[in-house]
Image: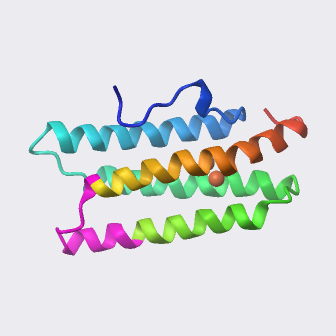
Amino acid sequence: MAFIDFTESELVNVKDIDNQHLKMVNIINRIHSGITKNRNYNYTSDLRVLIDEIEFHFETEERYMKENHFPGYYSHKLEHDRFFTQMVNNFEKMKEDRSINIGEQLISFKRWFYNHLDLSDKKCGTFLNSKGIL
Ligand SMILES: [Fe+2]
Ligand SMILES: [Fe+2]
């Protein structure tokens, strides 16, 4: 079983967004399997790729929301901004401080991902679907 499952119930039914979610989940799963199965694995470059992917993804969702005048735009963007700042801070800290644990970071990412998906991204997806965006 993968660290993060991505099944039909995780879909928001907007193709671009679903593809990006899947891409991020795959990177997270790769990092998780690296740190749990391979002693020589160094997560630094995969984590960098993940951060870039997340940044690109948030920009994509925000553009969709803004272009379509989604009423929940500001609070949704705020959730992105808070998460992103915290994640980048932790990543920077991890470079110097080995006591910050990558495994714990992945668990908190997973928690955030499912929560945000269920409470915010799906709402956004339903709204975009109603505007004919699939
Ligand atoms: Fe989002
Ligand atoms: Fe998302």
8 vs 29: above or below:
above
Image coordinates for residue 6, horizontal then vertical, percent:
50, 30
**What color scheme is it?**
rainbow
Image coordinates for residue 110, horizontal then vertical, percent:
44, 47
Q: Which residues are magenta?
A: 89-103
Image coordinates for residue 14, horizontal then vertical, percent:
72, 35
For the N terminus, the image quarter is top left
Residue at x-position 29% and y-position 74%:
93
The reply to whether the magenta stretch includes residue 92 is: yes
50 vs 122: above or below:
below
User: Horizontally, is 108 left or right of 80 in the view?
Assistant: left
Q: How many marks?
A: 0
Q: Nearer the viewer, residue 18 or 101?
A: 101
The rendered magenta stretch, by its main secondary structure, is classed as helix
Image coordinates for residue 134, horizontal then vertical, percent:
78, 32
The reply to whether the magenta stretch includes residue 35 is: no
User: Horizontally, is 113 left or right of 60 in the view?
Assistant: left
Residue at x-position 45% and y-position 39%:
25
User: Horizontally, is 34 left or right of 86 in the view?
Assistant: left
Q: Nearer the viewer, residue 78 or 17?
A: 78
Residue at x-position 32% and y-position 72%:
92
User: Horizontally, is 127 left or right of 74 in the view?
Assistant: right
Residue at x-position 40% and y-position 55%:
108
